[in-house]
Image (cartoon, grey):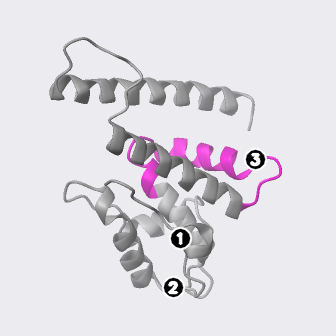
Amino acid sequence: MKNYTFPRWNDLPEIELYMDQVITYMNDKLKDTYFYDEKFITKSMINNYVKTGIVHPPVKKHYTKSHLAYFLVLTILKRCYSMQQITSLLRIYTNMKDSTIEQAYDLFISRFENSLNDVFENNRNTIEFENNNHEQELMDNVIQCIIYKMHTEYTLKKYEQEGL
């Protein structure tokens, strides 16, 4: 996992893809980020994302760079968040002032990559406990995830209450 990279906007395929090609592409780009036999993207998931309006429908069964960017981000976010929360996060993120989808995608991927690589390379923890062992380090990471998730849910709730 050291120095793991995701495709930037300009690295995404220029040609439009069919559903099976999208799944193959996504599986190839995400396979090393999953450690169990999880299905991180399926035809049903893609159809559901389109049906619920999280992702715009394909044109003549073709998926674009924009679709791929959304699918990559969705697959990353769904590890911790519900579809409702992801919808809110994407709405907030893609509506940032002075930001295009290309910029928002590249910024998200860059920050995610940096954090991912930092943790895997440096085993960086913000909370220092005495007598750390592997089990405690794992629990520290679980705690951090829960705290970050709680803060995210709190912030999302505020945005939702404000009608954003």
- Given the image, on which type of amino acid does mark 1 rest? Leu
The answer to whether the residue labelled 1 contacts the one labelled 3, judged by CB atoms less than 8 Å apart, is no
Camera-side residue of 137 and 88 = 137
Mark 2, Cα crowd under 10 Å, few <14 / some 14-19 / many 20+, is some
Element type where label 1 sits in the image: helix
Residue displayed at 39% across by 56% down: 3
Residue displayed at 47% across by 52% down: 113
**Residue 120 in view in this figure:** yes
Where, quadrant-wise, is the N terminus in this rendering?
A: bottom left
Where, quadrant-wise, is the C terminus in this rendering?
A: top right
Disc on the earlier residue, 2 or 3: 2
Residue 71 placement (x, y as % from top left): 50, 64
- Given the image, on which type of amino acid does mark 3 rest? Met
The residue range painted magenta reads 75-101
Disc on the earlier residue, 1 or 3: 1
Q: Which residue is mark 2?
A: 17
What separation in Å lies between label 2 and label 1 (alpha carbons)?
9 Å
- Given the image, on which type of amino acid does mark 2 rest? Leu
Residue 15 placement (x, y as % from top left): 58, 88
Residue displayed at 57% across by 86% down: 16
Residue 68 placement (x, y as % from top left): 53, 70
Camera-side residue of 108 and 124 = 124
Element type where label 2 sits in the image: loop
Give the quarter of the image for residue 12.
bottom right
**Magenta-span inclusion, residue 98:** yes
Disc on res. 68: 1
Give the quarter of the image for residue 147.
top left
Residue 61, placed above or below residue 158: below
Residue 69 placement (x, y as % from top left): 56, 66
Disc on res. 96: 3
Disc on the earlier residue, 2 or 1: 2
